[in-house]
Image: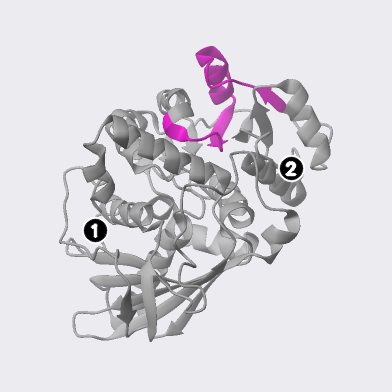
Amino acid sequence: MNRDAEFDIIVYGATGFTGRLVAEYLAQRYGVGGEVKWAMAGRSADKLAAVRDEIGAPKDTPLVVADAEDAASLKAMVDRAKAVLTTVGPYQLYGDALIAACAEAGTDYLDLSGEPNWMAATIAAHHETAKRTGARILHSAGFDSIPFELGVFFAQETAKAKLGGPVPRVKGRVRSMRGGLSGGTAASGRATMAAIMKDPSLMALMANPFALTPGFTGPEQPRGDQPEHDPDMDAQVGPFMMAAINTKNVHRSNLLMGHPYGTDFVYDEMSVVDPKAPASFAMSAEGGPQPGEGPSKEERDAGFYDLVFIGIAKDGRKVKVSVHGDRDPGYGSTSKLIAETAICLVKDAPEVGGGVLTPGAALGGRLVDRLQKNAGLTFKVETA
């Protein structure tokens, strides 16, 4: 971590839809220059000033001009921050220079990437550098994949307490949800499809649950691509669009922590199908909002998600835990998740070493506590 830096966190992309929500959250919760020293960054000083005023941030909120196309401006920004939080995606199009600058400088980096093809490439390119410099590189610090990664962590902690040890099988289930994906998520999906069209070998990476665990492959995992009856939910379940990224992050967490869930760990994600709306979770990267667009505050506030994690021991005993979020997943909750994860990394975890990490592996129970206290998440043991 860049310990002597001027700012704890710089929000890069603060004039975009999600970046603006992150800045607004930080301004409302932490003010400026107090417990958390943060700044807004983007390409245009005028736009940054306009957004600062629109979100009601103090006039003395620091503004930093930096451009993904200008390496010198990125380096200057990175040198001023303990952590750079970026919402400028698709990251495979706009993220390479920034992540390289952070890894080289020893500056922490957080993004909202759900782009496993790019994440696999960043692990190969930057993990060793970041280990050397102490930069903690955290991908997927929003709805994908924190509630799922920490849901599995919480289920395993519950199993240790109630069943005497971790379990080799966890099911992740989306019980209900209101609110859609962000425009950035849809754009990332389109960019990933374009990358696969150019390089068809990426298709195998997308289908591989262990694509982010180089050197390790665990047992065969459930595909989750066909509707089925789940007796543990007493409901019909179907494919969940984000399973392809979340499952990879869960397995990377297990690897980074030294396989506390076992090398034979099996995990899948599906969503409960609403019989009144059979396509309720068949979300697509096509259509939906464009990057920079999103739902109104009323829609964000009315959104929520309710996730269930069922841990099954070898002898059949089970634990069931839930994770609930109090805002729509793609924007309202995601903006709080990444902001609090950045603060947790900088303030609560100075001893964590560098590398391309996952939020769950880096922060574990500390992040569960912070998200419950500040970000509207609830972790609950339902049966054990």
Depth order, front residue of 168/188: 188
Tell which circle, 1 or 2, labels the residue nearer the N-terminal end.
Answer: 2
Disc ID at residue 259: 1
Residue behind mark 2: 34
Magenta-highlighted residues: 63-92
Disc ID at residue 340: none
Label 1: how many Cα within 10 Å (few below 14, some 14–19, many 20+): some
Q: On the picture, is 231 further left or further right than 201?
A: right
Label 2: how many Cα within 10 Å (few below 14, some 14–19, many 20+): few
Separation of residues labelled 1 and 2 (CA atoms): 39 Å
Task: Indicate the quadrant containing the C terminus: top left, top right, bottom left or bottom right.
Answer: bottom left
Does residue 201 show up? yes
Question: Residue 264, position in %: x, y?
Answer: 17, 64
Membership of 278 in magenta stretch? no
Q: Quadrant of residue 84?
A: top right
Q: On the picture, is 221 further left or further right than 272?
A: left
Of badges 1 and 2, nearer the viewer stands: 1
